[in-house]
Image (tube, rainbow, N blue to C red):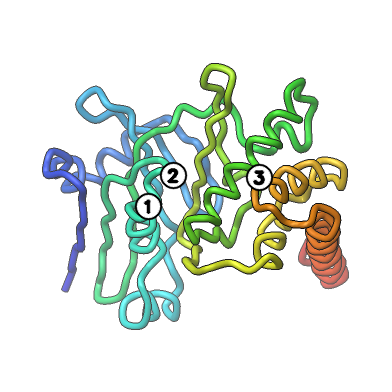
Amino acid sequence: MNVIKQQLINKKYKPLVDNIDRYFMESNVVLQDDRNMIKVIDFNNESLVIKSYKKPSFFIGFIYTFVQKSKAWRAYEYGLRISEFTPGVIARIEYLNPLLSKSYLICEKFEAEFNLQKPLFYNHPDKEAIFSQFAEFVYELHQQDIFHKDLSPGNILIKKSGEKYQFKIIDINRMSFKKLSKRQRAENFNKLWAHDSDLELMLKVYAKSAQFDEESFVRLGLEFNQKNKDRKTRKRKIKQALGLW
């Protein structure tokens, strides 16, 4: 028996939700095509983004059907909860037959100019301002008890608005909401894969906003950053040794 679960913020999107497969298939504007596929569609003269999640294995499908909420479900609920910090969510759709077999998330299109990879890994003339303002953005997240568990460069969208930069986080199905310790706040920067000098700038700005001791907070953040790099390097070497890389 096929079951379709839907949640949407406004009934005006019901025709899109009811025909999600067709809209997704007919779009030729692909933003991402790897584990999941992301496309842009036009609906009633509005540009929207649709994320189609990879079909889960039997085991994961069972978990998402009976044990915990799916990625699309969590991303939709979290998006409503942190609407100030992420592109506005519009709907989630799940197909169960009888286990979860397919899911979509629909959200508004944030007209990003680039993501954090550009100032981190390529030459950007305004990178110091971007890093400083990004640190303030992360501080605001933390002050609202928001911890993005995959705060990596590709998940941070950026566009310039006047003299300031605007940031939005995506891929938000892995979040936690809790009061954060100083260590947890420093650790949240460790997936940026940043050079020490760039990360030091961010940590100094953050420490000033949080009224932390600058030296100890910077040292803590740099330690977490290096530990994550070392861990990723070890994993890559193991995969290479096993012929999996």
Of marks 3 and 2, the one in the foreground: 2
Q: Nearer the viewer, residue 228 or 241?
A: 228
In the image, is residue 187 above or below residue 88? Answer: below
Q: Picture coordinates of residue 207 (x, y %)?
A: 72, 51
Distance from label 3 to label 2 (Cα)? Answer: 15 Å
Neighbours of disc 3 within 10 Å: few (<14), some (14-19), many (20+): some
Res. 228 image quadrant: bottom right
The residue to which callout 2 is attached is 86
Q: Quadrant of residue 225?
A: bottom right
The first of marks 3 and 2 along the sequence is 2
Residue sitting at x 59%, y 49%: 139
- Residue 60: mark: none
Mark 1: which amino acid? Gly
Q: Is residue 236 visible?
A: no
Residue where numbered disc 1 is placed: 79
* Left or right of residue 91: residue 210: right
Mark drawn on residue 153: 3
